[in-house]
């Protein structure tokens, strides 16, 4: 029986092997023909001298359309004409799925396709090595998050994605008919991960989907995204949370630089690993930077996309890609964020990466009366949050946490032009399929 090999481990001396893949190219030169067969790891040359190959097999292989899915069994021979140093002389082949023609999207063609064309034919787009490399790196990043979280004592949890109320108000909630009752798709696991802080599971994390009904059709917004959320109890200050985020992100960056070297090479990228701790700017400092740059903002305003970019450019000039922005006005933050006493600010922060927010977090309000007061101040009815508030009545420790957009993290890490490049099947205002 022939050995099953792929382009990463085929070598001279293997004898008879079977290679599975897609037909990338067919060149019929009359007396000899060549097929470039592509698998997940690279390409293998199938060499077919017409006089040495069974006529039926020769006709079968040379007649294949590009991107057909096949298995080819043959003898491995040394060759100084191929990148691998070997070629495969076919003995038999099995056609699993012949590709229709013309292709909806070129795989190795030099012609660039529009984003919509690519996303409409994502199955074909992902056959491109440089596109697939993004998602292999993304997979590694998620694995590294799990490793880093476990090393720091975090327990992995899963919280509901169909909920009775939103964590951040109703304007961006997707409504769901839940057996005749009003329900919503979760904006975040915020309420549940805080409730868990009262259970003894004092460090938890989750990587899962979140949904925002935002009518924003930009290169950084989607309606369904993957969030890495963490929460930790017994903190003394918001800086404890920031320090933990830095520790985990550093672990991810170092791991990707090592484990993802091949994929980074395909993309022509490298990973810069900043020194810890990441610098911290206050909202006030950032506001001054932005105003001095000519953006007409006032105290309490959101920095916005343009403001974040101005701050990012200023930090980049100092050699910093990753940095925190802290002490946001409490008025701009959700009810669960703790106010800074005697000031209009809060114990909150964002983590920005190259001029774009990838994470929000802070110290939470763990005191029952103050939390109820915050809700009322934000125009929320505490009676709608009874299931959540109950956890604060019976001994809730001080705690804080974060949410990091995995899609945005990968986008900024690889300098991708659009967050949709980091999502297999993105959802936005206009896209509901595939």
Image (cartoon, helix red, strand yellow):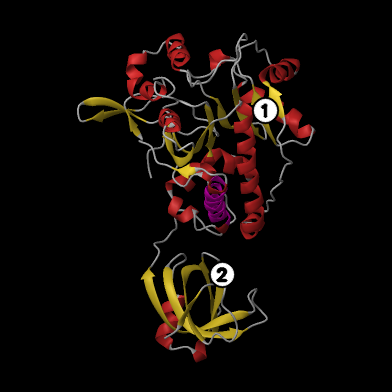
* Relative depth, front residue between 53 and 364: 364
Residue 360: percent from left, percent from top: 56, 29
* Relative depth, front residue between 104 and 369: 369
Element class at badge 2 = strand
Q: Inspect the magenta stretch and tell me whether residue 316 lies in it.
A: no
Q: Is residue 327 above or below residue 158?
A: above
Q: Is residue 375 above or below residue 26?
A: above
Residue 1: percent from left, percent from top: 41, 86
Q: Which residue is mark 2?
A: 43
User: Is residue 28 toward the left or the right of residue 303 in the image?
Assistant: left
Task: Determine the residue located farthest toward the right in the rendered image.
Answer: 318
Residue 125: percent from left, percent from top: 49, 53
Inter-mark Cα distance, 1 to 2 = 41 Å
- Point out the stretch of residues depicted in magenta: 130-149
Q: In the drawing, what numbered circle is on residue 378?
A: none
The reply to whether callout 1 and callout 2 are in contact (CB within 8 Å) is no
Q: Which residue is mark 1?
A: 309
Q: Is residue 196 above or below residue 275?
A: above
Residue 403: percent from left, percent from top: 52, 33
Give the dominant element type of the magenta stretch: helix, strand or loop.
helix
Estimate how packed mark 2 is, as few (under 14), some (14 to 19) or many (20 or more) residues with alpha carbons within 10 Å.
many
> Number of callouts in the render?
2
Tell me the residue at 57%/29% (across/down). 235
Q: Inspect the magenta stretch and tell me whether residue 136 lies in it.
A: yes
Task: Determine the residue located farthest toward the front in the rendered image.
Answer: 395
* Relative depth, front residue between 44 and 351: 351
Q: Is residue 294 visible?
A: no
Estimate how packed mark 1 is, as few (under 14), some (14 to 19) or many (20 or more) residues with alpha carbons within 10 Å.
some
Q: Earlier in the sequence, mark 1 or mark 2?
A: 2
Element class at badge 1 = helix
């Amino acid at each position: 029986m022939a050995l099953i090999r792929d382009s990463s481990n085929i070598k001279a001396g293997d004898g008879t092997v079977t290679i599975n893949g897609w037909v990338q190219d067919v060149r019929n030169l009359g007396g000899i023909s060549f097929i470039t067969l592509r698998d997940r790891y690279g390409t293998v040359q199938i060499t077919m001298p017409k006089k040495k190959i069974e006529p039926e097999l020769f006709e079968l292989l040379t007649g294949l359309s590009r991107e057909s899915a096949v298995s080819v069994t043959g003898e491995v021979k040394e060759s100084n004409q191929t990148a691998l140093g070997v070629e495969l002389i076919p003995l038999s082949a099995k056609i699993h799925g012949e590709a229709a023609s013309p292709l909806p999207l070129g795989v190795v063609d030099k012609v660039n396709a529009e984003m919509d064309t690519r996303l409409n034919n994502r199955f074909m787009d992902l056959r491109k090595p440089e596109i697939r490399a993004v998602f292999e790196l993304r997979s590694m990043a998620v694995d590294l998050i799990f490793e880093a979280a476990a090393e720091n004592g975090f327990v992995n949890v899963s919280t509901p994605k169909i909920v009775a109320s939103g964590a951040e108000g109703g304007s961006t909630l997707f409504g769901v008919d839940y057996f005749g009752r009003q329900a919503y798709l979760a904006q975040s696991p915020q309420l549940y991960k805080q409730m868990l802080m009262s259970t003894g599971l004092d460090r938890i994390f989750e990587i899962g989907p979140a949904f925002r009904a935002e009518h924003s059709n930009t290169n950084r917004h989607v309606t369904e995204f993957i969030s890495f959320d963490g929460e930790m109890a017994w903190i003394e200050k918001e800086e404890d949370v920031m320090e933990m985020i830095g520790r985990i992100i550093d672990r991810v960056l170092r791991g990707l630089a090592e484990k993802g070297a091949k994929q980074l090479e395909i993309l022509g990228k490298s990973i810069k690993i900043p020194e810890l701790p990441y610098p911290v700017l206050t909202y006030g400092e950032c506001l001054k930077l932005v105003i001095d740059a000519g953006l007409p903002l006032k105290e309490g305003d959101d920095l916005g996309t343009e403001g974040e970019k101005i701050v990012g450019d200023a930090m980049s000039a100092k050699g910093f890609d990753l940095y925190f922005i802290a002490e946001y006005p409490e008025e701009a933050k959700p009810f669960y964020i703790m106010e800074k006493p005697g000031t209009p600010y809060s114990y909150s922060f964002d983590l920005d990466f190259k001029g774009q927010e990838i994470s929000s977090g802070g110290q939470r309000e763990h005191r029952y009366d103050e939390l109820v007061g915050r809700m009322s101040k934000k125009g929320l009815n505490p009676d709608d949050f009874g299931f959540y508030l109950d956890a604060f009545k019976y001994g809730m420790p001080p705690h804080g946490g974060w949410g990091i957009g995995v899609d945005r993290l990968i986008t900024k890490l690889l300098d991708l032009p659009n967050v949709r490049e980091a999502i297999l099947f993105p959802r936005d205002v206009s896209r509901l399929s595939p």
